[in-house]
Image: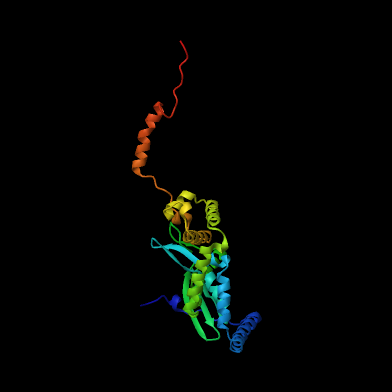
């Protein structure tokens, strides 16, 4: 396969580097070496890590942000969020993770990114290199991004998912699964708040974003008086996903559609209302 010459030509290295860049390179090397030494001298306490994880997952603030939800291919995809991954990495200890923009190509409108997670103590590392186009998907088609802030946010959003997967790849599976179960339990318990109060708070929160009670009841298939702890936990996850822009309210709670038959029935009843009878009282005639 023949590629354009300009595409295959490597970018020329800079003729010189600034003093700040040289200092940063030396600092990065020294920081990595120091991290390895500290990790070997102060190994993690697994029992303490488990206790700290359980304490964190019992907090509503983390439990509400511990999962994500977004549509894909006509279905809803859900799973543990990057917020949970970062907290578990902190609890486990001796882990470094991050997202690096290795190269930005404004001519082709793309950035080459790398997401990584590194267990310094075990010397277990997971990384992925990927290309992020400077575009944003919309209903009318992809929109090209030119503003620097939009490009930065687009790179960060795409990289957050890779960072999450990199962290989960080096954490013990049993550690992650227990954290997910504890967060789900915290949502069901509601931090000790009675169920009826949590239902009222959930309904009010959705009303603030324009979702009425009848749309919620239609989605769950039962009135609010019969909602369970699982229903409230599911609604909390959906509400967080809507507030973070992962899904829209119309995707989760579709508006009722008016059928052709209903329109025809309304049109047929319109002349009857114009003539009066049941809906409109007759006007009394004055005496002759």
Q: Position of residue 77 (x, y in %)?
A: 43, 65
Q: Residue at x 50, y 83 (%)?
A: 125
Q: Position of residue 188 (x, y in %)?
A: 51, 63
Q: Residue at x 41, y 75 (%)?
A: 4
Q: Quadrant of the N terminus?
A: bottom left
Q: Position of residue 239 (x, y in %)?
A: 51, 59
The tally of labels here is 0
Which residue is outermost to the top?
288
Q: How is the image coloured?
A: rainbow
In the visual, does 2 lie left or right of 195? left
Q: Quadrant of residue 89?
A: bottom right
Q: Quadrant of residue 260?
A: top left
Q: Judge by depth and name the residue closer to the eye, 183 or 77.
A: 183
Above or below 127: residue 268: above
Q: Does the image show residue 24?
A: yes
Q: Position of residue 179 (x, y in %)?
A: 51, 73
Q: Does the image show residue 108?
A: no
Above or below 32: residue 235: above
Q: Judge by depth and name the residue closer to the eye, 109 or 175.
A: 175
In the visual, does 213 lie left or right of 30? left
Q: Judge by depth and name the residue closer to the eye, 114 or 280.
A: 280
Q: Judge by depth and name the residue closer to the eye, 150 or 117.
A: 117
């Amino acid at each position: 396969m023949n590629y354009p010459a300009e595409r295959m030509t490597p970018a020329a290295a800079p003729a010189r580097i600034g003093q700040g860049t040289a200092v940063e390179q030396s600092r990065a090397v020294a920081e990595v070496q120091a991290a390895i030494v500290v990790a070997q001298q102060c190994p993690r306490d697994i029992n303490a890590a488990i206790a700290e994880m359980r304490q964190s997952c019992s907090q509503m603030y983390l439990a509400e942000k511990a999962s994500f939800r977004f549509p894909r291919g006509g279905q809803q995809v859900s799973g543990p969020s990057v917020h949970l991954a970062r907290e578990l990495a902190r609890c486990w200890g001796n882990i470094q993770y991050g997202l690096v923009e290795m190269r930005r190509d404004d001519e082709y409108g793309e950035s080459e990114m790398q997401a990584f997670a590194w267990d310094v103590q075990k010397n277990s590392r997971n990384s992925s290199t990927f290309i992020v186009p400077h575009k944003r998907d919309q209903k009318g088609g992809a929109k090209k991004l030119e503003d620097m802030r939009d490009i930065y946010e687009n790179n960060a959003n795409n990289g957050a998912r890779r960072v999450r997967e990199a962290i989960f790849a080096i954490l013990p599976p049993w550690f992650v699964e227990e954290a997910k179960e504890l967060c789900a339990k915290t949502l069901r318990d509601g931090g000790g708040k009675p169920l009826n109060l949590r239902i009222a708070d959930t309904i009010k929160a959705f009303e603030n974003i324009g979702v009425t009670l009848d749309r919620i009841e239609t989605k769950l298939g039962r009135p609010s008086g019969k909602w369970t702890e699982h229903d409230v936990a599911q609604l909390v996850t959906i509400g967080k996903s809507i507030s973070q822009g992962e899904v829209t309210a119309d995707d989760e709670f579709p508006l009722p559609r008016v059928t052709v038959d209903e329109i025809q029935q309304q049109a047929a009843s319109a002349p009857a209302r114009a003539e009066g009878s049941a809906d409109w009282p007759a006007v009394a005639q004055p005496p002759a």
